[in-house]
Amino acid sequence: GDSWGIFTFLCAALCNLPALPALNCTEELGAGQSIQKTYDLTRYLEHQLRTLAGTYLNYLGPPFNEPDFNPPRLARAERVPSATVDLDLWRGLTDNARLAANYRAYSRLLCYLRALDGQAGTAELRHRLGHFCSSLQGLVLSIAGVMSSLGYPLPTGPAGPPAPPGTPVAPNDFLKKMDDFWLLKELQTWLWR
């Protein structure tokens, strides 16, 4: 009789372990691991972008590869999501709003980078851009994982204002290079954020 009683007690205790909040931390651990993975991937992308940007800016040539080159942002560059925002405003947003903003921005930046990948003039540059795009896609998926683990819905609709139909590509090579320069600069600022 005693062994059945102990067995029943152990079974009942084991069945109720998931209901004990102190012992059931799988949800929090999952979100925590997702957040850490996203942070680590962001730091990796930041490091990877330094190398890619140097290579790409050298490919663009002067004045884009000069350290002090800091042109004004043209209206054409406004299609690229800007990471410039008031710090107090950013901190005042909910976690969901900040995650959604990051998800939208990185999704759009990824689209622009993929377009660069198809235009890169050297095999090495195409390889680096392709690798970076794969890593950035991983970051977008990781942000989606964090949002999901926290119970937030993924953003719907466009990731920002689309280019108007029939928007011409840059009218000349210099303006195209300027677009590429601002894309890399904004991506760097998003990763620092």
Image (spheres, helix red, strand yellow):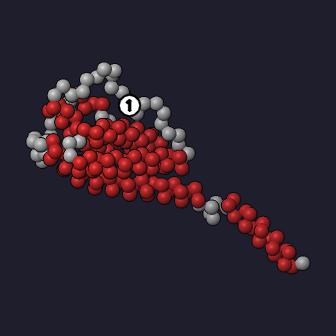
Numbered label tally: 1
Q: Residue furthest bottom?
A: 2
Q: Is residue 98 left or right of residue 164?
A: right
Q: Nearer the viewer, residue 155 or 94?
A: 155
- Residue 52: x and y, percent? 24, 50
Indicate the position of residue 50 as horizontal and vertical percent values: 23, 52
Q: Please, is residue 2 above or below residue 68 in the view?
A: below
- The amino acid on which the numbered mark 1 sits, given as a three-letter code, is Gly
Asked if residue 85 shows in the view, the reply is no
Q: Residue furthest right?
A: 1
Residue drawn at x 85%, y 74% is 5
Residue beneath the point at 22% across and 38% down:
180
With respect to residue 150, does 79 lie above or below?
above
Residue drawn at 25 percent across, 38 percent down: 119
> Does residue 6 appear to the left or right of 192 in the view shown?
right
Q: Is residue 10 left or right of residue 159?
A: right
Q: Position of residue 24 (x, y in %)?
A: 63, 61
Q: Is residue 59 visible?
A: yes
Q: Quadrant of the N terminus?
A: bottom right
Q: Which residue is depicted at the point 54% across and 59% down?
A: 29
Query: Would you name the residue on which mark 1 appears?
Result: 160
Viewer-proximal residue among 117 and 70:
117
For numbered disc 1, what is the local secondary structure?
A: loop
Residue placed farthest to the front in the image? Answer: 123
Q: Position of residue 42 (x, y in %)?
A: 36, 52
Give neighbour class at mark 1: few <14, some 14-19, many 20+ (Cα, 10 Å): few
Q: Is residue 14 above or below residue 115?
A: below
